[in-house]
């Protein structure tokens, strides 16, 4: 019988994919001597535990139980390493970053859903995009955005006051919902030159709703993060997307609808902005953001870039979706967490209110003035230390590597492990939260929320460890060439809104149970059974904010 070339190639491809999925059951590895919990499932390993963990507590619990290096199991028993060893973090994110790509496969699920943006690309393409984007997030541009942030913050505060003004003892307010609306509008106006919300009614914008729904929906289909890289070896992105749209799974279809809608609206907005740019500065003055928004700055710079450095339309669309997603849930949920913690610490809340009120004296604070408020800065840093919105990030292993450890661990056989041996094709999960809360580095009170720690010298052990994060010896915004490019933008959002909200309102806990769930980004729900992102606090007006 004669077989066509296509049948032979297809069979070979299927066998290769099958080997990728099953070889972990037959091949021994040095990781077998690393301690870790037993796998709850032959097929999905610890994946479900990791993504359904309350607020990323699975990663935290693993660090507390097994130490700085933990062996986990992934899809079809694949070995994975969960670590917060500072030397390994430095090697993976900085020293040998090219050997640890975000995705060792041709592409992953985020490339499928968002396109080739700075969050999903690798190697030369990523470096080219990063080079174009770095100037966009300069402090000079952020200083000009402070007024935009205040203008949005005032409108939101006025809307909240209309809700609570008639209740002298305060009213229950979904703080998470309001902060989500504020950060979305800030990202829209300052990032895209686009308005999502007028804060007058509860009308919704389809693009904004898609951004808000992305990660909660993703949590319901998180297994595609392990399936897509395997499929990527034999199928193009568009074909996998077509297959996913046809699968009769409600959440998967919703995920693909969100992806399609974000791509379509991004195309429309970029087209409108290009037309406005070609008409000149007079036209831009009549647009949202007045041409000062990040996308206008990027488009203007891209028009002047050389052919080798110019971003394609597909890349520009992906940057837009990526920027909205990366900035929306992370900042809004970090700020929500700050208000929640302050509601449980009324003395610290009052101390912050006094500092902000005295500094403002009825006026807006400039970018530099906000940066010089010590207790506001301490509250932000401590909240981001103890509760990073993203608890862990993943990196693939592109080649066999030996990684020296900063803190040796004891192996299953009782020997001291001073080096970690990883093999090509394996996954490493970098435990950002555990690094931020490591008692070895931060002291015995590492798990306590204490803003005062930032008003004193940091522990010597922390300085000696040389944590590779880009922000305050923390891994919250990651480190190296793939660190969060917009972390200063996020900090400005957080400080502007926190200063306005605290000087306008008093926040009190309700006593109702709050669950912090994890879906790539942690988010609050009212009770363990709920899946709705929500945080109810009792909010009381304390004074006029102007």
Image (cartoon, rainbow, N blue to C red):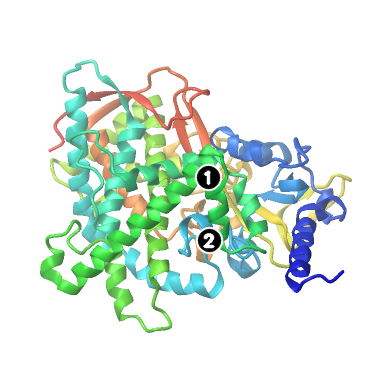
Q: Residue at x 52, y 57 (%)?
A: 112
**Residue 24 placement (x, y as % from top left):** 81, 53
Q: Nearer the viewer, residue 390 or 41?
A: 41
In which quadrant is the N terminus drawn?
A: bottom right
Q: Where is mark 2, residue-wise?
A: 238
Quarter location, residue 42: top right
Quarter location, residue 400: bottom right
**Residue 230 placement (x, y as % from top left):** 67, 57
Q: Residue at x 53, y 75 (%)?
A: 124
Answer with mark 1 or mark 2, whichever residue precedes in sequence: 2
Report the mark closest to the observer, 1 or 2: 2
Q: Residue at x 23, y 39 (%)?
A: 500
- SS for tag 2? helix
Q: Eyeballing the image, is 116 above or below 416?
A: below
Residue 202 in sight: yes
**Residue 390 placement (x, y as % from top left):** 51, 46
Say which mark, if any, is on residue 520.
Answer: 1
- SS for tag 1? loop
Q: Nearer the viewer, residue 64 or 298?
A: 298
């Amino acid at each position: 019988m004669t077989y066509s070339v296509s049948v032979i190639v297809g069979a070979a491809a299927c066998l290769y994919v099958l080997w990728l999925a099953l070889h972990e059951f037959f091949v021994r590895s040095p990781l077998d001597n690393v301690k870790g919990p037993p796998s709850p499932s032959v097929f999905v390993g610890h994946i479900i535990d990791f993504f359904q963990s309350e607020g990323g507590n699975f990663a935290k619990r693993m660090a507390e139980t097994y130490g700085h290096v933990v062996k986990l199991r992934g899809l079809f028993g694949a070995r994975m390493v969960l670590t917060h060893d500072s030397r390994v973090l430095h090697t993976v994110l900085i020293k040998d970053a090219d050997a640890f790509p975000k995705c060792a496969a041709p592409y992953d699920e985020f490339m499928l859903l968002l396109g080739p943006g700075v969050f999903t690309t690798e190697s030369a393409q990523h470096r080219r995009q990063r080079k174009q984007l770095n100037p966009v997030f300069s402090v000079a541009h952020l200083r000009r955005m402070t007024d935009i942030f205040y203008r949005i913050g005032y409108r939101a505060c006025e809307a909240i006051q209309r809700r609570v003004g008639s209740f002298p003892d305060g009213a229950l307010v979904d703080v998470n919902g309001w902060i989500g609306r504020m950060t979305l509008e800030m990202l829209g106006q300052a990032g895209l030159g686009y308005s999502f919300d007028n804060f007058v009614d509860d009308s919704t914008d389809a693009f904004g709703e898609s951004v808000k729904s992305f990660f909660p929906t993703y949590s319901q289909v998180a297994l595609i993060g392990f399936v897509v890289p395997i499929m990527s070896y034999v199928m193009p992105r568009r074909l996998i997307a077509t297959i996913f749209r046809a699968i009769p799974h409600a959440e998967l279809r919703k995920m693909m609808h969100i992806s399609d809608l974000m791509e379509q609206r991004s195309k429309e907005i970029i087209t409108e902005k290009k037309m406005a740019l070609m008409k000149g500065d007079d036209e831009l003055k009549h647009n949202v953001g007045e041409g000062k928004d990040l996308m206008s700055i990027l488009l203007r710079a891209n028009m002047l870039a050389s052919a080798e450095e110019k971003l394609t339309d597909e890349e520009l669309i992906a940057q837009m979706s990526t920027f909205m997603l990366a900035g929306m849930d992370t900042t809004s949920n970090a700020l929500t967490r700050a208000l929640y913690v302050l509601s449980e610490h009324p003395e610290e809340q009052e101390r912050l209110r006094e500092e902000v009120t005295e500094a403002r004296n009825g006026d807006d604070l400039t970018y530099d003035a906000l940066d010089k408020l010590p207790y506001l800065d301490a509250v932000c840093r401590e909240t981001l230390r103890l509760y990073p919105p993203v608890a862990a990030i993943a990196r693939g292993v592109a080649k066999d590597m030996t990684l020296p450890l900063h803190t040796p661990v004891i192996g299953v056989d009782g020997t001291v492990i001073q080096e970690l041996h990883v093999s090509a094709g394996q996954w490493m999960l970098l435990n950002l939260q555990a690094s931020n809360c490591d008692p070895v580095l931060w002291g015995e009170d590492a798990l306590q929320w204490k803003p005062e720690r930032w008003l004193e010298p940091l522990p010597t052990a922390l300085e000696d460890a040389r944590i590779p994060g880009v922000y305050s010896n923390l891994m919250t915004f990651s480190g190296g060439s793939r660190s969060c490019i917009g972390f200063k933008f996020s900090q400005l959002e957080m400080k502007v809104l926190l200063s306005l909200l605290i000087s306008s309102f008093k926040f009190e806990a309700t006593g109702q149970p709050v669950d912090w769930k994890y879906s790539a980004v942690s988010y609050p729900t009212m009770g363990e059974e709920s899946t709705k992102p929500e945080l109810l606090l009792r909010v009381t007006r304390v004074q006029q904010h102007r």
